Image (cartoon, grey):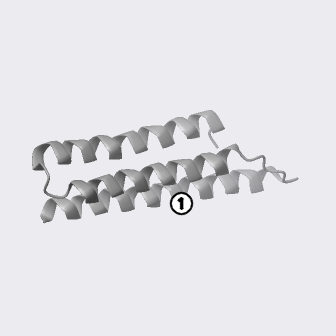
Amino acid sequence: MAKRRVLKKDVDFLVSEVVSDCYTFMMFNGDKSHDEAIKVIESALDKRNEAYKKISSRVKHENPKEVKKYYKQIQQEFLEGVDECFTKLSELTKK
């Protein structure tokens, strides 16, 4: 398991990629789907805040494997959420 600090940096990196791609989409497409792109950004930021809360909470387990499993689950949920954001953005480009 990576340290919580590294996990938070990974979360920030992926969210910044979503936001960057959304701004690039808005720049090239003008007002075409501006509001939907903003919703994708808001969704990514909500997922970031939710992941931060889970990462920052103190986990008290007697078994270290349970702690690793907890952080692995957070990581997996966040990756699925970011993938969902990228999917929504790619659907916007098809319109």
| Residue displayed at 65% across by 46% down | 55
Q: Nearer the viewer, residue 39 or 18?
A: 39
Q: Residue furthest right?
A: 62
| Residue displayed at 84% across by 51% down | 60
Q: Nearer the viewer, residue 36 or 17?
A: 36
Callout 1 crowding tier (Cα within 10 Å): few <14, some 14–19, many ≥20: some
Q: Quadrant of the C terminus?
A: bottom left
Residue 82, given in percent of the width and then of the height, sits at 41, 55
| Residue displayed at 24% across by 43% down | 23
Q: Nearer the viewer, residue 73 or 30?
A: 30
Question: Would residue 3 be found to the left or right of residue 67 on screen?
Answer: left
Q: Quadrant of the N terminus?
A: top right
| Residue displayed at 62% across by 39% down | 2
Give the residue type that dot 1 points to. Answer: Glu
Q: Which residue is mark 1?
A: 77
- Depicted 27 relative to depicted 85: above or below: above
Question: Would residue 17 be found to the left or right of residue 77 on screen?
Answer: left
Q: Quadrant of residue 56?
A: top right
Residue 76, given in percent of the width and then of the height, sits at 53, 58
Residue 6, given in percent of the width and then of the height, sits at 57, 34
- Depicted 13 relative to depicted 74: above or below: above
